[in-house]
Each structure stands twice: as C-alpha cells, then as structure tokens.
Image (cartoon, rainbow, N blue to C red):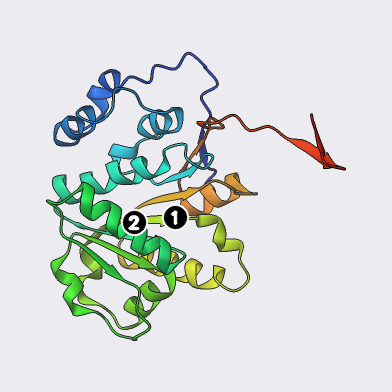
Amino acid sequence: MKHANQTRDKDKSIETSVESFKHLIPETIFSHIANQFKHFRPGQAKAIKAGLFKNKNLLVCTPTASGKTLIAEMAFLQAIKNYNKKVVYAVPLRALANDKFQEFKAKYPELKIAISTGDFDSDDKFLAMYDLIITTSEKLDSLLRHKAAWIKQVKLLIIDEIHLLNDISRGPTLEFVITLLRKLIPNLQIIALSATIGNPEELASWLNAELVIDDWRPVKLYQGIYLDGEVEFY
C-alpha cells in the first residue's frame, strides 16, 4: 500500500485568484469557472495544485460549505467535456441525490444528467444515454451486480460523504463498489469528499489519493460549554 501524498499548504498568503490558475485548468473549463468566480477558496486551490486536472485521485477533507462541490464539478466537467466519458456521483441519501440532480440540471443544462436511486433491482439500461449519473452507493451496488454495460465508459467516480466507509451498515457496500469499480476501470479517477474523517492519511493511502486538507470555513467556528443558560467560549 502506497503512502498518501499530502497537500497541506500552510502558506496563508496562497494566491487564490482564478486567473492565477489558468495554466493549470483546461481552457473549456477555465472559461466556465472564470465567468462565475474571481477567486478560489483555499481547499479548491489546493485540489487543483494536487492534480485535479491531471487525473489524480483526491481525498478532500475540508469543512462544510468550504467549496467541495465545485471541486467535484470541475472534475466532472473535464471527464465529460474533455474526455467524452461518463461520471458517477455517489451520495449516501436519496434526498441528497435529488438535491444534486436539481442543482446540476439547473447549472449545467448542456449536460445529460440522470438520477438513479430506486429500489427496483436492475441495470437501468437507460443510463447509457447520460453523461452524469447521480446515485446512491446501494443503487450503484445493484448496477454493478447486474453488470450494466455502460459502467466501463465511466471515467470519474465522485464519492460524497466518504467517511461513511466507517458506518457499520453502509460502509461495506461503499467499500465494495469502490473496490469493484477500481478493478473494472483501471484508469478510473476518484474524487472523495468529506468534512469529517478520523483517519484521512490511512484512507488516502487506500484510495491511492492525494490528501487535500484545509480548515478554512466561510463562518468562523467557536467552541464553548453551555451551562445554566450561559455559554462560556474557549
């Protein structure tokens, strides 16, 4: 098992302007990003430097609302637009799958986006017509067991809430689909996202991934103790 390469940029003066990353981003994707944003958040900048656009596996550990979704979006835009391949976006809950489906359909009308989360056990042949497939790990397990023909066209696997690998009920299924997809698709790129991972170095090593860690958050987090109606902050 290889040791994880870690990207822990402690330089607080890190340049985060979108323009400064132009040389690292494919032109088709850069124009899309530059039209929407002027600056990258720290975690996003670190992910690009770690090899987001060089087909590197990434384990991104940053707080909630720190911009992990945009990292996933940049990755799937490259897989679809530059490589003409499919992307699977795996989430833990149907409600989250539906939220992502609605969000991405509105944001990327030019892409063919599908959602597959039903209980019916099948290979969902209709998914062969779509670029971005949003599903749960349980449904992905079903698709793999039915040997869905389109699976080998997948270039990128995005795993939201990767820390659920440690969940006693859902973890084994998630581990199975990751392991099988890596076997079926030798050049598969994996982007794993989480706000809370207890063993990031070990997990990054298992995924053969670059570890991207940052503690920046849009709203400062304070810790304290609540007692008798009052909060004493540390």
Residue most extreme to the bottom: 121
Left or right for 234, reference 62: right
Q: Identify the mark at residue 100; answer none if there is no mark.
A: 2
Viewer-proximal residue among 160 and 232: 232
Q: Position of residue 93 (x, y in %)?
A: 45, 66
Q: Residue at x 49, y 73 (%)?
A: 173
Q: Residue at x 36, y 41 (%)?
A: 71
Q: Quadrant of residue 228?
A: top right
Left or right for 199, reference 179: right
Compared to residue 15, the image places residue 128 above or below, namely below
Viewer-proximal residue among 6 and 221: 221
Residue most extreme to the right: 228
Q: Position of residue 209 (x, y in %)?
A: 45, 46
Left or right for 125, reference 94: left
Compared to residue 140, the image places residue 111 above or below, namely above
**Type of amino acid at the residue the image marks with label 2:** Lys
Compared to residue 155, the image places residue 214 above or below, namely above
Mark 1 or mark 2: whose residue is earlier in sequence: 2
Label 1 close to label 2 by CB (< 8 Å): yes
Q: Quadrant of the C terminus?
A: top right
Q: Position of residue 204 (x, y in %)?
A: 52, 48
Left or right for 74, reference 194: left
Q: Secondary structure at mark 1?
A: strand
User: Mark 1 sits on what residue?
Assistant: 160
Confirm whether residue 92 shows in the render.
Answer: yes
Viewer-proximal residue among 216 and 88: 216
**Type of amino acid at the residue the image marks with label 1:** Asp
Residue most extreme to the top: 13
Confirm whether residue 1 shows in the render.
Answer: no
Q: Secondary structure at mark 2?
A: helix
Few, some or many residues within 10 Å of mark 2 (<14, 14–19, 20+): some
Q: Residue at x 36, y 27 (%)?
A: 40
